[in-house]
Image (cartoon, grey):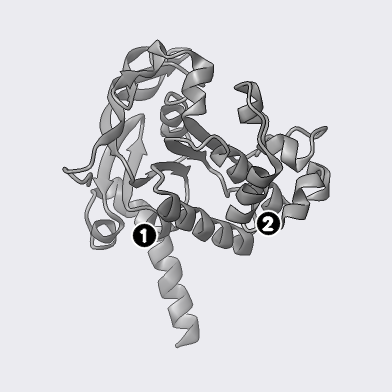
Amino acid sequence: MMDAEAATLVQFDSVSKSFAGVIAVDAVSCAIAEGSFVALVGASGSGKSTLLKMVNRLGDPDQGRVLLEGGDVRDAEVSRLRRRIGYVFQGVGLFPHMSVAENIGIGPRLAGERAKAQRIAELLQLVELEPEYSARMPHELSGGQRQRIGVARALAGNPHVLLMDEPFGALDPITRDGLGKRVRKLHDELGLTSVMVTHDMAEALLLADRVLVMDAGQIVADETPHSLLHGAGGTIAQALVAVPREHALALAGLTA
């Protein structure tokens, strides 16, 4: 649950969104505390990505408001709003004709600034890549390296909040685990506020300090990983927790 003493950075105020008459998000209200790492978990179609995208106006609510640092995101000029938000998504979306350095620096460039070579090197170091990667092209990188560049790009503007939409879903298990741990470490080191959409409950339990479970467009559980593992959150949340728990028990049985 949210620390009562922490300031609210992102707030959803009775937010609803429909597509062609189908309700994707249904009157959601919740607050994300500054400095927290929140995972949005749920089955496909539960509304978690739709909810996340409304923070940086990749979609606007039909009803309700999304507030960032107390202000309605629809009152801000879109480009200015997005300078305050880092966004990482599964497809990465690197520009194939641009070098790594140019891809990382695209945000500052659109803001009329230039990311210096030293800053690019610092960002590469944050995601555990050597400065020499700055000259490479996206097609020369592995999937894990491209996703690390995506994280570096999201951090280039010193964002107030980091949004991640299934950021590790296309990666192999070893790369996914390593990058997840690195992102969590960056969250702590840089004092970020992070919101991550994932369908993987094990990933949510390992990385987040608060888990919001969505179903049919609503938040049906709001718990810490510890409380979820101890049976809290209700039937839908526990059905999601059961999967990694059963896997762990099966593996324990194989090694016994």
At x 62%, y 39%, the residue is: 153
Provide the secondary structure element on which disc 1 rests: helix
Question: Neighbour class for label 2 at 10 Å: few (<14), some, many (≥20)?
Answer: some
Residue 95 % position (x, y): 75, 32
Disc 2 marks which amino acid?
Leu
Residue 105 placement, left or right of 63? right
* Nearer to me, 104 or 150: 104
Residue 64 % position (x, y): 30, 16
In the depicted structure, whether residue 191 falls above or below residue 87: below
Q: Is residue 56 visible?
A: yes
At x 31%, y 57%, the residue is: 225
Disc 1 marks which amino acid?
Ala
Give the Cα separation between the discs numbered 1 and 2.
36 Å
- Mark number displayed over residue 129: 2
Residue 184 % position (x, y): 46, 55
Provide the secondary structure element on which disc 2 rests: loop
Residue sticking out furthest to the left: 4
Residue 39 placement, left or right of 236? right
Q: Dividing the picture into quarters, in which one does residue 61 lie?
A: top left
* Nearer to me, 106 or 62: 106
Q: Is residue 201 visible?
A: no
- Mark number displayed over residue 94: none
At x 41%, y 45%, the residue is: 192
- Can you identify the residue that label 1 sits on? 242
